[in-house]
Image (tube, rainbow, N blue to C red):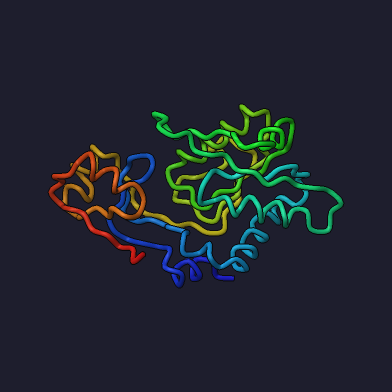
């Protein structure tokens, strides 16, 4: 399967001026939301993704909320295929109003499904690694052993070494330029006055903090 082509056909890949969860500015974005209604496609993609971990004796598949939740469920399902063993599928919720990205296992039974277990973390898109690193920390603090990370797409620079995990598996790469807010104002798209997309990523938060940004704001989604 040409997964990147599937993403393009589904309208998941964008070019433009975006702001990520890390507050960094981006020249592109991958939004997997249009993909997730296609249940059979998502199932087949996750099956391919977890196949690389079939011999790792995974006890639990965990994902960060909210977009990647279907991956944890399908991942656990496919890792059980042909085996006489239950694999748990759980997710960690975002900690609201935390100063930095933070997750917690707060639902009944979820922390118990992680403690003392071999855990595979599945994410949809890893960009600047802020969320996935927070998720890895959450699993380890809950007593789980992170055996690897699987994701549908990554930006450049994402590696097992950068995440401090034994193994990273991805289905494709979606690469684009990244600037800090300060550098973007000097060398990036802000310096060129490119409008910021406010309805994908965290452009809406940037707009609230910078309503007078000279490039203005645009919307790309037709909800």
Give residue 132's position: percent from left, percent from top.
Answer: 52, 40
Give residue 143's position: percent from left, percent from top.
Answer: 68, 28
Give 90 or 51, whichever is nearer the viewer. Answer: 90
In the rendered structure, the answer to whether residue 86 lies left or right of residue 149 reads right
- Residue at the image point whose x is 66% and y is 36% from the top: 108
- Residue at the image point whose x is 50% and y is 64% from the top: 35
Q: Which quadrant holds residue 49? A: bottom right
Location of the N terminus by quadrant is bottom right
Give residue 206's position: percent from left, percent from top.
Answer: 26, 43
Residue furthest toward the right?
84
Q: Is residue 7 above or below residue 141?
A: below
Give 123 or 177, whichever is nearer the viewer. Answer: 123
- Residue at the image point whose x is 29% and y is 43% from the top: 205
Give 151 or 117, whichever is nearer the viewer. Answer: 117
Q: Which quadrant holds residue 160? A: top right
In the rendered structure, the answer to whether residue 195 lies left or right of residue 34 reads left
Location of the C terminus by quadrant is bottom left
Q: Is residue 210 above or below residue 169?
A: above
In the rendered structure, the answer to whether residue 215 lies left or right of residue 170 reads left
């Amino acid at each position: 399967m040409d997964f990147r082509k599937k993403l393009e056909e589904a309208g998941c890949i964008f070019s433009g001026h975006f702001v990520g969860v890390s507050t960094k500015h981006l020249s592109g974005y991958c939004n997997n939301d249009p993909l997730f209604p296609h249940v059979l496609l998502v199932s087949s993609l996750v099956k391919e993704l977890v196949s690389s971990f079939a011999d790792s004796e995974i006890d639990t598949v965990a994902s960060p909320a909210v977009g990647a939740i279907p991956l944890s469920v399908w991942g656990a399902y496919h890792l059980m295929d042909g085996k006489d063993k239950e694999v748990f599928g759980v997710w960690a919720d975002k900690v609201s109003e935390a100063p930095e990205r933070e997750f917690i296992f707060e639902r009944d039974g979820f922390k118990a499904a992680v403690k003392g277990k071999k855990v595979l973390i599945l994410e949809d898109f890893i960009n600047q690694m802020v969320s996935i690193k927070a998720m890895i920390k959450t699993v380890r603090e809950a007593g789980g052993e992170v055996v690897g990370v699987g994701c549908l797409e990554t930006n450049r620079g994402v590696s097992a070494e950068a995440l401090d995990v034994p193994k990273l598996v991805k289905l494709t790469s979606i690469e684009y330029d990244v600037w800090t807010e300060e550098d973007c104002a000097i060398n990036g798209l802000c310096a060129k006055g490119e409008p910021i997309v406010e309805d994908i990523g965290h452009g809406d938060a940037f707009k609230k903090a910078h309503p007078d940004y000279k490039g203005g704001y645009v919307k790309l989604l037709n909800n």
